[in-house]
Image (cartoon, rainbow, N blue to C red):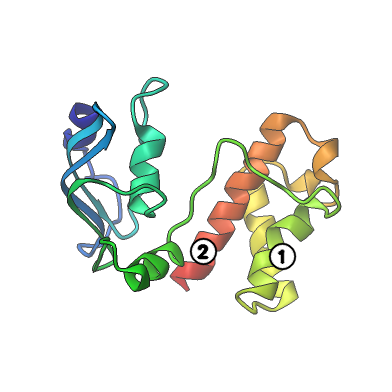
C-alpha cells in the first residue's frame, strides 16, 4: 500500500493550490501484530482530487478512516487543514466537521426522495436555503449521471444508482464546506 501512495503523481494538468489540505508523514497503523499501513507519506493540496486504489484488504479504507480519525494511527503524523490529528477531541471534532467519506454500505433514508436525501443535511445542519440546496444537489446528481432519479425513492434505484446518490451527497457536502 505505501508504495502506491508514495509514488509521485503527475499534477501538471491540474489547477491546484499550493496550500496543503492533507499532509501525512511516516504514518503507521497496526491491528495487533498486522502492520496494515507502513510509513505512509502523502500530500494532498487544496483543489486536488486523488484516487486511492488497491486490492481488497490493502488498507484503503483504513487510511481514509485514519484521516478523519475514525481509526487511530499508532505513529507518524496526520495534519488536515493545519490541524494535527492527535488524541485531542477538539481537533478531532474540527477535522470531522470538514472531512467527508462515502462508505461502501451507505444509508439513505427510504422514506425520503433522492433529492430530499441530498438536501436534508445542508438545509437542517448547515442552514442552506432549500432552493440553493436543491440546485446544488441537482448539479451533483447530474455529475454522477442520475438527475432523472431525483424524485424517486432509494428502494426504486439499483445498488449502483444508490451508490452514485451517496457520492453526490458527499460532493454536495464538500461543496458547502468549501464555500
Residue 175's disc is 2
- Corner quadrant of residue 63: top left
Q: Residues within 10 Å of mark 2 (few under 14, many from 20)?
A: few
Left/right placement of residue 174 relative to residue 4 reads right
Q: Residues within 10 Å of mark 1 (few under 14, many from 20)?
A: some
Residue sitting at 30 percent across and 49 percent down? 14
Cα separation between marks 2 and 1: 15 Å
Q: Nearer the viewer, residue 10 or 167?
A: 167
Residue sitting at 44 percent across and 69 percent down? 178
Residue 98, given in percent of the width and then of the height, sits at: 43, 65
Residue 2, given in percent of the width and then of the height, sits at: 20, 31
Q: Is any atom of residue 107 visible in this view? A: yes
Left/right placement of residue 61 relative to residue 74 reads right
Left/right placement of residue 44 relative to residue 130 reads left
Residue marked by disc 1: 120
Q: Secondary structure at mark 1?
A: helix
Amino acid at each position: 500500500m505505501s508504495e502506491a501512495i508514495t509514488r509521485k503523481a503527475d499534477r501538471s494538468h491540474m489547477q491546484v493550490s499550493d496550500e496543503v489540505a492533507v499532509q501525512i508523514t511516516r504514518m503507521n497503523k497496526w491491528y495487533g501484530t498486522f502492520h496494515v499501513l507502513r510509513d505512509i507519506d502523502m500530500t494532498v493540496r487544496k483543489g486536488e482530487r486523488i484516487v486511492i486504489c488497491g486490492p481488497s484488504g490493502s488498507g484503503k479504507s483504513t487510511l481514509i478512516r485514519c484521516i478523519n480519525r475514525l481509526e487511530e494511527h499508532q505513529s507518524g503524523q496526520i495534519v488536515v487543514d493545519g490541524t494535527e490529528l492527535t488524541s485531542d477531541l477538539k481537533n478531532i471534532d474540527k477535522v470531522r466537521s470538514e472531512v467527508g467519506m462515502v462508505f461502501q454500505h451507505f444509508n439513505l433514508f427510504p422514506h425520503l426522495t433522492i433529492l430530499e436525501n441530498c438536501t436534508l443535511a445542508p438545509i437542517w445542519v448547515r442552514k442552506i436555503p432549500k432552493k440553493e440546496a436543491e440546485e446544488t444537489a441537482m448539479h451533483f446528481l447530474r455529475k454522477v449521471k442520475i438527475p432523472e432519479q431525483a424524485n424517486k425513492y432509494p428502494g426504486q434505484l439499483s445498488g449502483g444508482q444508490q451508490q452514485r446518490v451517496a457520492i453526490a451527497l458527499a460532493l454536495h457536502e464538500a461543496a458547502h464546506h468549501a464555500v
